[in-house]
Amino acid sequence: MSSGTIDIDEFEDADDDEFEERNDTERIVSFLDENDDRAWKAATIAERLGLDTDAVSAILSRLKERELVRHKRPYWAITDDEDRLRAAYRLHRHHETADEQYSEERLEELRTDDMEKVR
């Protein structure tokens, strides 16, 4: 797959503003997932996505702690645990939906000890 493209089915199924809203973490995970046949240097990922290399490295480190990416210096690849990746995506979408519905400030009021266990 070449840089700057997406699968036509993903394009057709997306809302008009869906791609603008992707944050850097989502963009990195999507990039690695779409290119799961290769491992990448952080600088190359940054270049391909138009991001700062230090920011990409920091995000990749956080993703590694959550076991969503694999790392063998200096290369990074998406996890091969598809169930874990799907679960993380569902949790992420759940948080986005809750944030949109209740606002971030209201979510802090609703937070419980059980919610912290999910992390």
Image (cartoon, grey):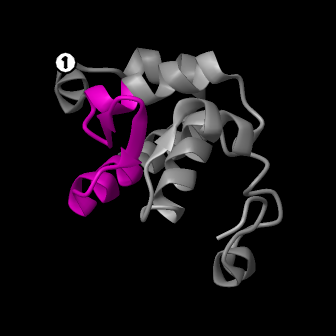
Compared to 80, does 23 lie above or below?
above
Q: Residues within 10 Å of mark 1 (few under 14, many from 20)?
A: few
In the displayed structure, does residue 75 sit left or right of residue 14? left
Q: Position of residue 104 (x, y in %)?
A: 56, 23
Looking at the image, residue 91 lies above or below residue 107 = below
Q: Is residue 31 left or right of residue 82?
A: right
- Boundaries of the magenta span: 62-90
Q: Residue at x 34, y 21 (%)?
A: 111
Residue at image point 64% right, 23% down: 53
At mark 1, the secondary structure is helix
Residue 56 locus on image (x, y percent): 57, 27
- Residue at the extreme right of the image, as rendered: 16
Viewer-closest of 9 and 61: 61
Identify the residue at horizontal 64%, vertical 71% (top origin): 1
Residue at mark 1: 113
Where residue 87 sits: x, y (%)?
28, 53
Q: Is residue 87 above or below residue 54?
A: below
Q: Which corner quadrant holds the C terminus?
A: top left
Count all numbered tags in the image, as a single digit: 1
Q: Does residue 74 appear left or right of residue 82 in this picture?
A: right
Q: Is residue 31 magenta?
A: no
Q: Is residue 88 left or right of residue 37?
A: left
110 in relation to 67, above or below: above
**Residue sitting nearer the eye, 23 or 116:** 23
**Given the image, on which type of amino acid does mark 1 rest?**
Asp
In the figure, residue 12 lies in which quadrant? bottom right
Residue 93 rendering spot, x and y as whole percentages:
47, 49
